[in-house]
Image: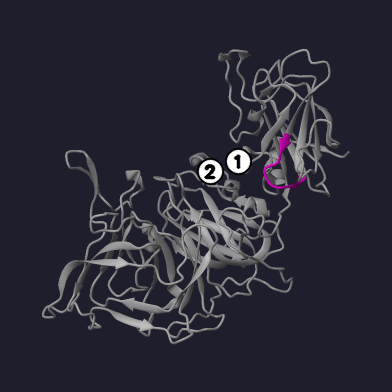
Amino acid sequence: MQFNSLPISGFESVLAATTTEVTSVATGAEILDVSDDFFSPATDLLKVEPSVSMKGQFGPNGALFSGWESRRHNPDHDWVIIKLGPPSAFLKGFDIDTSFFSGNEAPAASVEGIYSPDAVPTNQSTWTPLIPKVPLGPHSRHLFTIPQTTEPYTHLRLRQYPDGGIARFRGYGIVSPIWGKQHSWDGDKPGQVDLAHAFNGGRCVYESDKHYGVGANLLLPGRGKDMGDGWETKRSRSAGHHDFVIIRLGAPGQIQRVDIDTLHYKGNFPAGVELHAINSPLEIPSLNVEEGWTQILSRTKVGPHEHHFHDIKVAEETVFTHVRMTIIPDGGVKRLRVYGTRAAPKPSESSSSTPATVAVPTTTPSSSSSVPTIAASPLTSSGFAPFGQVVQAFPDQSLAPRDIKVTSANGSTASKYHRLSIPRSTYPANSGAIQAFSCFRSEPPKGFGKLGGDSWLFESKMWERHPFTTQTFLPLGKDENGGLERGGEGMLVVVALNGKNDKPDVSTAKAFIASASQAITYDVGVWHHSVLSFVPTDFACLESQISTDGDRTEDCEIIQAKEGDVFVKVQVGETK
């Protein structure tokens, strides 16, 4: 078998930038069986964090170490069987790390693999040698590369001779994606996959800075466990600074939606984020954003500890191979999801540095396939900011928008979030408009779907706006004495900005899922669909009106689609 030792200096360029770590617990890798781990558990081998010294600490069985350590006097060897995190991978290299094991390190080790997607392999299974028995030294990393395997593997067996300790074991390779509805990952929808997901073959090929967390973390499954498993850069100290990562997609494709997740980043999230994409045969395209990159998301403000969903509007036939995320000026992002459809790249195509736009109707609905489809996202203050405000409390005060003042109230039994939404009325002084609360008892529209489970489409066939007033909807709880027997379960919010022709600009349309603990305020003149509750719900409504008869366009202007026409389609479903 062919293999080579790799100096530590070559790790970044040879393995880190070209492969995915497929044995990390962060990807779901796990220990299936072990011959002996008397002193230290084999599960330590797969930990994300480096091994640490535990000198002077003792447990029931002896001195403690961060790693796998078997008992002494084994006549031949010890072994451990590891299930890879991704479904399978083409392997390219390994890191056998004996950090802090000195005098009790494993003197030698070997690595073998097996492809067994439907059965759990055992020590008696037929294993394929990948790295022969090689010597190991104390307190050091041992890097090895092999020619990329021509067949994928699902499991690895690490053997140490005859016994001792290994701190960490890391296997690197190219993930072999399993495309199809039966294998969907975080947030995937029917016909739409996360092209950047690690399990779909996405890889981080470049990061400008990784002081507190590597770029590859952006592509991991799930949302992680703390601030340590995202991508975070050091604080910048110069004007105009920015950091960026480049992601090679698992397959060339058309990008339709992104999710920029800042979970756990509460005081260190970026001030802004922008995205570019390119179609390039290079592993790492030009680092100069002016050379061939297409802007797919202009600079956008993000908030702390939340999802930020954005629909991407580029020409439908445009195919990309890489995405570049720029954060301004620095900070941390937990995950980047790039949803779209796979497409075979056309060798003759080249990217333009000028963003391509899709033609979207701004005034006239259509019954054709050109009707835009937007995905409903969880309602957040930052996402809804172009259209109005969100009124809510927060489980952690640090999650409130920075411009919101929070004080103690009611004898320190409450926290008050000040001025989340300020009602406005721009009616002429002599109009007779009155600001007042009213109550809406809302029923779901006929055929309206439910939250959770399979996704479904809602066809929006109307718009309304209030030209002279804000309008706030506050869901009310359940009450058997005059109220509803069950509380609300939130509502679907569909909004659009006004266009140049004083009609809804459908290219700006967004959809949000508001929870039962969130109230919303539509800004003056913002186009929106009427209330869309998922279950019968009572809403308190604060607005200004001239008339209570619903006959004044100054109070509410409504546009209805013609029979058979649709303004916009909204994809609704469980959002992870």
Farthest residue in the right direction? Answer: 1
As drawn, is 28 to the left or to the right of 357? right
Residue count near mark 1 (Cα–Cα under 10 Å), binned few <14, some 14–19, many ≥20:
many
Q: Secondary structure at mark 2?
A: loop
Give the residue type that dot 1 points to. Ala
Q: Is residue 171 above or below residue 389?
A: above
Q: Residue at x 18, y 79 (%)?
A: 547
Would you say 11 lies left or right of 153 here?
left
Q: Position of residue 388 (x, y in %)?
A: 32, 65
Q: From the top left corner, tell me how far across and down residue 8 is, in percent.
A: 70, 36
Which region of the structure is painted magenta? Answer: 82-91
- The numbered disc on residue 224 is 2
Q: Earlier in the sequence, mark 2 or mark 1?
A: 1
Q: Position of residue 527 (x, y in %)?
A: 35, 75
Q: Is residue 330 above or below residue 322?
A: above
Q: Indicate yes or no whether the magenta region holds residue 567.
A: no
Whether residue 504 is visible here, answered yes or no, is: yes
Instruction: Write the residue at 55% across / 61% down.
Output: 454
Q: Secondary structure at mark 1?
A: helix
The residue under label 2 is which amino acid type? Gly
- Label 2 neighbourhood size at 10 Å, few (<14), some (14-19), many (20+)? some
Q: Residue 84 lies in magenta, yes or no?
A: yes
Of 536 and 371, nearer the camera is: 536
Cβ–Cβ under 8 Å for marks 2 and 1: yes
Where on the picture, by quarter, is residue 337?
Answer: bottom right
From the image, which quarter does the N terminus lie in? top right
Circle 1 residue: 26
Kindly report the distance in space between the C-alpha atoms of the residues bearing marks 2 and 1. 8 Å
Can residue 288 be seen in the rendering of this structure? Answer: no
Above or below for 360 versus 95: below
- Residue 466, quarter of the rendered image: bottom left
